[in-house]
């Protein structure tokens, strides 16, 4: 008698093969801005192998510092900076 084997569906089976864009929301105040810089550089270096557009919305109390740093270091990531009170 014939045997039918069915593949079990997983979450990843329903995902598109290529993601066109990614939006990331981050919060970095005071000393955590340095951590955010490292994360952003890692994204700048590695994210574009699979993703065409990366946008970061950063909530921070160090708006000027972040904007100046981003102008020098982020070439492909779109950054939107939102001012909030400092935490941490």
Image (cartoon, grey):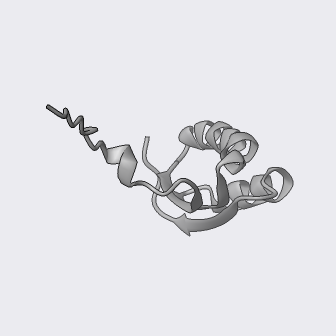
Residue 71 is drawn in which quadrant? Answer: bottom right
Relative placement, left or right, of 32 versus 6 is right
* Residue drawn at (54%, 39%) of the image: 32
- Residue sitting at 71 percent across and 50 percent down? 48
Residue 36: image location, x then y, percent: 60, 43
Find the residue positioned furthest to the front: 1
Q: Position of residue 80 (x, y in %)?
A: 61, 68
Q: Quadrant of residue 62?
A: bottom right
Say how many tags the image has: 0
- Percent coordinates x, y for residue 60 in the rendering: 54, 57
Q: Is residue 32 above or below residue 74?
A: above
Residue in the image at 55% along x and 57% along y: 61
Instruction: Pick the residue in front: 66 or 19.
Output: 19
State the residue at coordinates (42%, 54%).
15
Q: Nearer the viewer, residue 82 or 41?
A: 41
Q: Is residue 60 left or right of residue 66?
A: left
The x, y position of residue 19, in whole percent, is 56, 58
Taking depth in this image into account, of 29 and 35 the one nearest to the observer is: 35
Location of the C terminus (image quadrant): top left
Residue 57 visible? The answer is: no
Q: Quadrant of the N terminus?
A: top left
Q: Is residue 13 visible?
A: yes
Q: Nearer the viewer, residue 42 or 72?
A: 42
Name, please, the residue furthest toward the left: 1
């Amino acid at each position: 008698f014939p045997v039918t084997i069915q593949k079990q569906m997983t979450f990843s089976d329903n995902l598109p093969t290529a993601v066109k864009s990614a939006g990331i929301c981050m919060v970095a105040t005071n000393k955590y801005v340095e951590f955010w810089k490292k994360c952003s550089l890692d994204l700048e270096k590695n994210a574009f192998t699979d993703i065409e557009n990366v946008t970061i919305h950063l909530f921070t109390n160090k708006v000027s510092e972040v904007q100046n740093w981003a102008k020098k270091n982020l070439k492909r990531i779109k950054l939107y900076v939102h001012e909030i009170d400092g935490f941490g």
